[in-house]
Amino acid sequence: RSRCFIRSLDELDRAEAAVELAKLRTFTVLGFSFLTGAACGGWLSRWLGASALLLPAAVTATMGVAYLLHQSGLWMRATCQEQQDMTHMTSDFSTRGEESVNDKMDGMEAGSKLAWA
């Protein structure tokens, strides 16, 4: 079929091919990692027996703690940024001039007095 050549592909087909290539890379790395882990686990179990399971458990626990610390650091930075933004917004309101705020409040009070009159 003539669609096998890259030159004859349109943009949509090229985008789909790029996605499929990314999937192929991901699954290849995943497969080789699985096979490597199985081989290393088999070799390590001959040395340590059932204690060989402690190595993957320790790696998983270490990665989980690192992820937790990383996420909590991001959350704290986002919270601090949000507080700074709120402080900046409130300072903008206070620097606009209390006269304009007072004028608006006086206008609102006058309007409410007319409504009751």
Image (cartoon, rainbow, N blue to C red):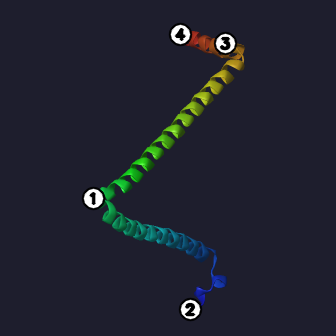
Residue 71 location (% of width, % of height): 49, 42
Reading the image, the residue beneath label 4 is 116
Residue 44 location (% of width, % of height): 36, 63
Vertical position of residue 98 compared to residue 20: above or below:
above
Q: In which quarter of the image is residue 43?
A: bottom left
For marks 4 and 1, the one nearer the N-term is 1
Q: Residues within 10 Å of mark 2 (few under 14, many from 20)?
A: few
For marks 4 and 2, the one nearer the N-term is 2
Question: Callout 4: helix, strand or loop?
Answer: helix
- Please count the marks in the image: 4
Which of labels 1 and 3 is toward the front? 1
Vertical position of residue 101 compared to residue 14: above or below:
above
For marks 3 and 4, the one nearer the N-term is 3
Q: Is there CB contact under 8 Å for labels 4 and 2?
A: no
- Give the CA separation, mark 3 to mark 4: 21 Å
Reading the image, the residue beneath label 3 is 102
Outermost residue on the left side: it is: 50
Q: Quadrant of residue 111?
A: top right
Q: Which mark is residue 1?
A: 2
- Give the CA separation, mark 2 to mark 1: 54 Å
